[in-house]
Image (cartoon, rainbow, N blue to C red):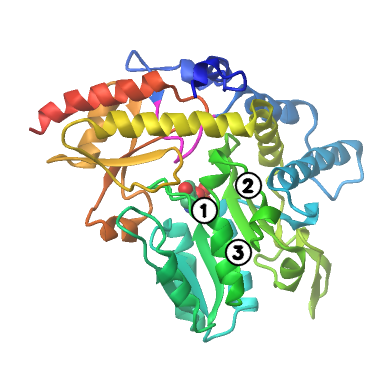
Amino acid sequence: MNVMTNPTALDVARVRADFPILAEKIRGKPLVFLDSAASAQKPRAVIDAVRNAMETQYANVHRGLHWMSERTTDAYEAARDTVAALMNARDRSEIVFTRNVTESLNLMAHSYGRGVLQPGQAVLISAMEHHSNIVPWQLLRDERGIELRVAPITDAGELDLEAFESLLQDGKVGLVSMTHMSNVLGTVTPAARIVRIAHAHGAKVLFDGAQAIVHRRVDVQALDCDFYAWTGHKLYGPTGIGVLWGRRHLLDRMPPFLGGGEMISSVTYEKSTWAVVPHKFEAGTPPILEGIGLKAAIDYVGSLDFDAIAAHEAALTEHAIARIGNVEGVHILGRAQDRGGVVAFTLDNAHAHDVATLLDRQGIAVRAGHHCAEPLMRRFGLESTARASFGIYTTHEEIDFLADSLVRVREFFK
Ligand SMILES: *Cc1c(COP(=O)(O)O)cnc(C)c1O
């Protein structure tokens, strides 16, 4: 399919014009931003929405009886409706706002882990998790005696489904907590199959969707999962807001995570009672401006058509694997069948940090390091890699420039 002549194809030039930062120069050179998997740039629609809220309709939410507070509450709660629609949640009350996906996962480990799971049960993750989906479960294990199991991956960087299923066989796993897309390998995990297998063995399923939600349509009812967590800043929204979606009856069973204002129904020194879901999990002044910005981001992405975005990113990824993979001495990590717009690579004889530093001189922003996935790096016998990642504004020309620059960088390390 020729993307250029496809009528529903993404108009990348128009998209780029919507992102003011892309006009910035780095050391006199155009910014080639290939680090969207760490955090995406923001379209003018998001910038304007946040500024407009501060300039024209801002007050604290849910408490004031005055006009300004009611307006702000409406704007903030509209974000919850937009997120519910994005994920096809059954009900808006199933959308909990947090600070980021890390907090969503910690909420799960604290509340579901300590309040619903029992000592002797296990949590099952995979060998390609971000630290945010490892460490909260380790803390839980050490405190509560809840076992932490790790499902292996293949050399291609795909979940070993057979091993995964065998780890569920004894019926002790209460929760599977797994990435929906690896931030290092780009692997998209077979979410619906994971859910079917886990449910057949009595386990609930939580997905870390920090990457997946950016690159695909996520329908929690179609996936049939129980919880789904993600972070706003990677979906072109502001920092400081994350999402935890959960089935209402499960959220109802879970104890609060943080205590304070907003999350209570009544408070006495003897006993407090909790607000209903989702407010039970939203202690303190919520991310008001961030919510308003996130709604603008989702509306913006929605205006571009999610399928066109997915097609654009698939074409970019294929192009990147072909171009970068063809540079002598470059090795791409992971070759999953189903993958998103993230390409991690090493260069023979070169440290990833040096590669990133030399690319930066050309105005190219890539990430280098362990990508918050040290156990995964170790699985492949590595300490670090460079990583290029793509967004809706990424062009084929930028990837060509990266590949050509890598050819020059290679000369330093021959
Ligand atoms: C970025 C990322 C995280 C952490 O996101 P925060 O916004 O820092 O909480 C967790 N998991 C995956 C897969 C990620 O890509």
Check whether the beta carbons of the residues at disc 2 and disc 3 lie within 8 A of each other.
Answer: no
The quarter holding residue 308 reads top right
Q: Earlier in the sequence, mark 2 or mark 3?
A: 3
Q: Is residue 105 visible?
A: no
Q: Earlier in the sequence, mark 3 or mark 1?
A: 3
Q: What element does badge 1 sit on? A: loop
Decide: is 137 above or below 386: below
Residue 401 appears left or right of 171: left
Dot in front, 3 or 1: 1
Residue in the image at 38% along x and 47% along y: 184
Q: Nearer the viewer, residue 267 or 38?
A: 38
**According to the image, label 3 marks what residue?**
107
Percent position (x, y) of residue 73?
82, 43
Q: What element does badge 2 sit on? A: loop
Give how far apart the Cα atoms at labels 3 and 1 are.
18 Å
Q: Main secondary structure of the magenta part?
A: loop
Residue at the left extreme, as displayed: 414
Residue 275 appears left or right of 52: right
Check whether the beta carbons of the residues at disc 2 and disc 1 lie within 8 A of each other.
Answer: yes
Q: Which mark identifies residue 218?
A: 2
Residue in the image at 54% along x and 63% along y: 194
For the residue marked with disc 1, what is the amino acid?
Answer: His
**According to the image, label 1 marks what residue?**
180
For the residue marked with disc 3, what is the amino acid?
Answer: Leu
Which span of residues is magenta-colored?
33-41
Give how far apart the Cα atoms at labels 2 and 3 are.
21 Å
Query: Number of numbered discs present?
Result: 3
Decide: is 310 above or below 168: above
The quarter holding residue 348 reads top left
Residue at the front extreme, as displayed: 1
Residue 39 is a magenta residue:
yes
Percent position (x, y) of residue 140?
50, 75
